[in-house]
Image: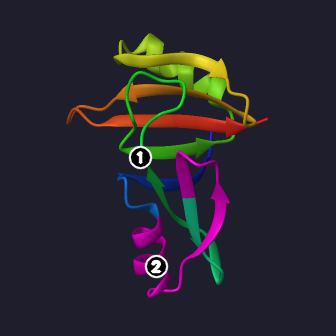
């Protein structure tokens, strides 16, 4: 299993202000679903920040997202190791397959793969 990217998720109701602030550092909007917006560096597209008002389908908003090349394998490993699954593996309408797991620090990690 390989990690493709890691994205911090900032919970905020100030999407426009965040877009402007991170724009000062060179980030540009690459995705906006209304409840989550992702900003990326044009020179290094995997360098990203997401700003979200909440989680559309999950009971909790994640602190970070980790995109992997095999989300099913990641889910199996987490289950085998007894990790706390906060949101079970499923396909989302916006084209990702994902689950949430709690890390040892109490942070919620969105583990995903694009379909």
Residue labelled with disc 2: 20
Image coords of residue 46 (percent x, y): 61, 66
Rendered view: 65 above or below 91: below
Image coords of residue 102 (percent x, y): 32, 27
Rendered view: 26 above or below 48: below
Q: Quadrant of the C terminus?
A: top right
Q: Tell me the tag on residue 64.
A: 1
Rendered view: 19 above or below 53: below
Q: Earlier in the sequence, mark 1 or mark 2?
A: 2
Image coords of residue 49 (percent x, y): 48, 62
Q: Is residue 89 magenta?
A: no
Mark 2 burial class by Cα count in 10 Å: few <14, some 14-19, many 20+: some
- Residue 39, quarter of the rendered image: bottom right
Assign a secondary structure to mark 1.
strand
Assign a secondary structure to mark 2.
helix
Q: Tell me the tag on residue 91.
A: none
Rendered view: 37 above or below 92: below
Specify the color scheme.
Answer: rainbow
Point 44% across, 77% down: residue? 22
Q: Nearer the viewer, residue 57 or 1?
A: 57
Point 76% across, 36% down: residue? 95
Point 58% across, 49% down: residue? 34
Q: Nearer the viewer, residue 66 or 42?
A: 42
Point 37% across, 28% down: residue? 60
For the record, the magenta segment spans: 16-37
Q: In the image, 97: left or right of 82?
A: right
- Residue 30, quarter of the rendered image: bottom right
């Amino acid at each position: 299993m390989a990690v493709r990217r890691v994205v911090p998720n900032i919970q905020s109701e100030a999407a426009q202000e965040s877009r402007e602030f991170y724009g000062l550092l060179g980030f540009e909007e690459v995705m906006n679903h209304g409840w989550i917006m992702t900003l990326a560096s044009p020179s290094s597209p995997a360098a990203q920040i997401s700003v979200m008002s909440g989680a559309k389908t999950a009971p909790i908003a994640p602190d970070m997202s980790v995109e992997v090349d095999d989300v099913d394998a990641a889910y199996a490993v987490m289950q085998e190791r007894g990790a706390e699954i906060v949101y079970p593996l499923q396909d989302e309408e916006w084209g990702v397959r994902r689950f949430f797991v709690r890390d040892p620090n109490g942070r919620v990690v969105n583990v995903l793969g694009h379909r």
